[in-house]
Amino acid sequence: MATIKFQKPSSYFNNPGNVNYFIDGQLQTSTFEGTTEIIEVGPGFHTLSMKNKWISSPELQFNILYNETKTFEVGVTKAIKIYAVIFVLMLIIPLLHSPEYFSYNVFIPTLIILLVLLYATIRRRGYFTIKEI
């Protein structure tokens, strides 16, 4: 048998949270922050992907030999990091302006709706990264 290891960083902005790992389209395991998972697979060509709720990673194809160990580092793309910064800014902006300049009843809900739409539609299958190390 061959071995696959998944390493997840424990940093806040690069942590994909609880994710499910799929090998050849079948659920293999789930991981949490800062953990390393080990999966035994047969030798040959395989496809690897990650999913968390409605977002996922692109499929990665790889070849593994008998008694070989491959290690993959998983994380999030820059898009998730940008969305996190936008969300924090949405919380800070109302504190910087007085009600005379903005109608917060429209401004904040509009930004939240736009953020959710971007997060749910654009490249929703490309938020996670998988790199062989």
Image (tube, rainbow, N blue to C red):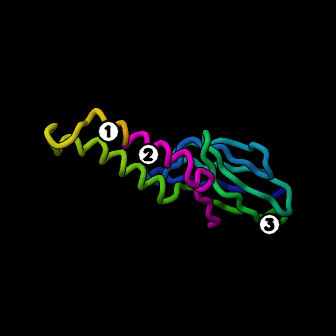
Q: Position of residue 56 (x, y in %)?
A: 63, 49
Most foreground residue, 133 or 51: 51
Check disc 3 and report its element: helix, strand or loop. strand
Asked where in the image residue 111 lies, by quadrant, the reply is: top left
- Which residue, as the protein is rendered here, is positioned at the far top? 105
- Location of residue 69 with respect to 88 vertically, above or below: below
Q: Where is residue 5 in the image (x, y as percent from the top left)?
A: 67, 55
Q: Which of marks 1 and 3 is nearer the N terminus?
A: 3
Disc 3 residue type? Asn
Check disc 1 and report its element: helix, strand or loop. helix
Asked where in the image residue 19 lies, by quadrant, the reply is: top right
Q: Mark 3 points at which residue?
A: 63
Q: Name the residue under label 2.
A: 115
Asked where in the image residue 74 lies, by quadrant, the reply is: bottom right
Distance from Cα at disc 2 to Cα at disc 1:
11 Å
Q: What span is in magenta? A: 111-133
C-beta proximity under 8 Å, tags 3 and 2:
no
Check disc 2 and report its element: helix, strand or loop. helix
- Location of residue 122 with respect to 109 vertically, above or below: below
**Residue shown at the point (59%, 50%) measured from the top left:** 124
**Residue shown at the point (76%, 65%) measured from the top left:** 62
Most foreground residue, 58 or 102: 102
